Image (tube, rainbow, N blue to C red):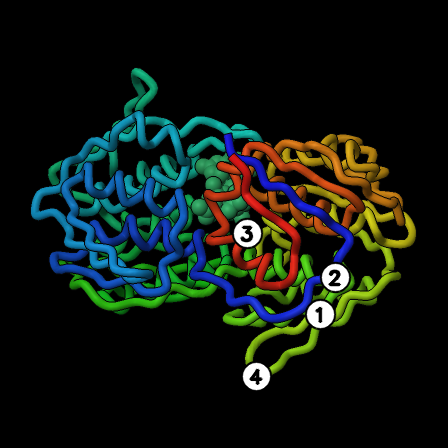
Amino acid sequence: MKNLVIRGGRPLNGSVRVSGSKNAVLPIIAACLLPVTPCTLEDIPDLVDVHTICLVLEHLGARIDRSGSTLVIHPPERPCTEAPYEIVRRMRASFLVMGPLLARTGQATISLPGGCAIGSRPVDLHLKGFHTLGARIEHGYGSVRAEVGPNGLRGNRIYLDFPSVGATENIIMAAVLAEGQTIIENAAEEPEVVDLANFLNAMGAQIKGAGTKVIRINGVKELHGVTHPVIPDRIEAGTFLLAGAITGGNVLVQNVILDHVKPVVAKLNEMGIMVYEESEGLRVTGRDEYRAVDVKTMPYPGFPTDMQPQMMALMTGARGTGIITETVFENRFMHVSELRRMGAKIKTVGRNAVVQGPAGLSGAPVKATDLRAGAALVLAGLRAGGETVVGNVHHIERGYERLVEKLRGLGAEIEEVV
Ligand code: EPZ
């Protein structure tokens, strides 16, 4: 198994370019099943999760040519309608092929994605949406099968009990070729939903309201492939801003859309850590002393749950006591015990974590339990005195492209050891 070995205590300085967004590109690749002609996707990060969704699409009959960070995806004439269990179980986002398959072929059989470290992560809202559009849903043998009747999918009004990102995206992809209008209420407003809608509209879809709570989709007959550069990864950008902050360094984060990271920048400013907008990107200047704050994760435009573990690592060095409340996932504090091993003073009570600081961190062997928990441990290792060894690096490789190279470029003492 690979480990990351970090010798902390040095400020990071320099500039780093953020890659394309993992959480934008996964639904966009799934959406490439919809058009009748090929799509060209640009700024695609080289990530394990991207390879996984490409494997699913190839199994369904698509042909994918990759050159550098550009993907050309040739949709299948007649897609296979069954996604392979052994691939889907690796990554929950594979479930995002269900909407496009339903729209293109009228049927889809996908294995139910398992839960993961951060929660049970059901797909009931996705299935409620498909059912409301006219699909019959059957469960069996760990898979779910959806099949539309002879009239195909028909537009309808859907209210999401929770503004689920994946459910919003999956329902949009099912509705774009449905008969009539679909209205999604209490929809997710994340930038990745907007990027997907922009991509689909460029292909000829008629989607209005993406980025707001009410999205209207008028079904069309056919979609045609386009070229689309994906948006930058706002969570990677936030992670690097916090890397500069936690080490008291001076880091310019390039290729970032300020609006997408506003909740994180606002919190840093509250802590007394300044972030400046420059022509090339956002510059963070860390400082030895910064204030503790309270953080509550919320659906966009609230503070992102995907930055919660990284913020907790930063808060270990803040002066005072801060409370972090995780409202999106039911079990996203797996990083707490690992941070405690490094000397952090954190107590969890239900969905709240009370962080007391400043706590001096010392390097220790720790284990990543999921993608963002792993990123938090790397940040803590960059601040801690001595050597930190982060295990289960495969979690981190799912969502951060060339992380070691980028951090070394900022002066970090970090290496990957098998
Ligand atoms: C997306 O996951 C992201 N992944 C996650 O990022 C992110 O944490 C999450 O949105 C929230 O922002 C991708 O985009 C690939 P949800 P998703 O459906 O769509 C419950 C990362 O680190 N729920 O908005 O799966 C669910 O259990 C990953 O990059 C239902 O109850 O998230 C959770 O508590 C982690 N029923 C909450 O909603 C459903 O049918 C949010 O889930 C669907 C979701």
| Whole-number angstrom distance, CA of label 3 to CA of label 4 | 26 Å
Cα–Cα span, label 1 and label 2: 8 Å
Disc 3: which residue: 404
Which is more foreground, mark 1 or mark 4?
A: 1
Query: Mark 1 or 2 closer to N-term?
Result: 2
**Residue drawn at point x = 14 percent, y = 41 percent:** 61
Answer with mark 2 or mark 3, whichever residue precedes in sequence. 2
Of badges 3 and 4, nearer the viewer stands: 3
Separation (CA) of disc 2 from disc 3: 16 Å
| Residue 376 occupies quadrant | top right
Give percent across and percent down for residue 190.
Answer: 50, 57
Which of labels 1 and 2 is toward the front? 2
> Which residue is label 1 attached to?
250
Do tag 1 and tag 2 residues touch (Cβ < 8 Å)?
yes
Tell me which residue sits at (68%, 36%) in the image: 335
Q: Amino acid at mark 2?
A: Pro
Q: Residues within 10 Å of mark 4 (few under 14, many from 20)?
A: few
Residue identified by numbered label 2: 11
Image marks 2 and 3: residues in contact by CB distance under 8 Å: no
Residue furthest out toward the bottom? 279
Residue 182: x and y in percent read 32, 54
Q: Amino acid at mark 1?
A: Asn
Q: Amino acid at mark 3?
A: Val
Q: Amino acid at mark 4?
A: Ser
Q: Is residue 165 above or below residue 270?
A: above
Q: Which residue is mark 4?
A: 279
Q: Which numbered disc, 3 or 4, marks the residue that appears first in the sequence?
A: 4
Mark 4 or mark 2, whichever is nearer to me: 2
**Could you tell whether 375 is left or right of 88 in the image?**
right
Q: Using the numbered discs, state the Cα–Cα distance from disc 1 to disc 4 in whole angstroms.
A: 16 Å
Is 373 left, or right, of 225 in this rendering? right
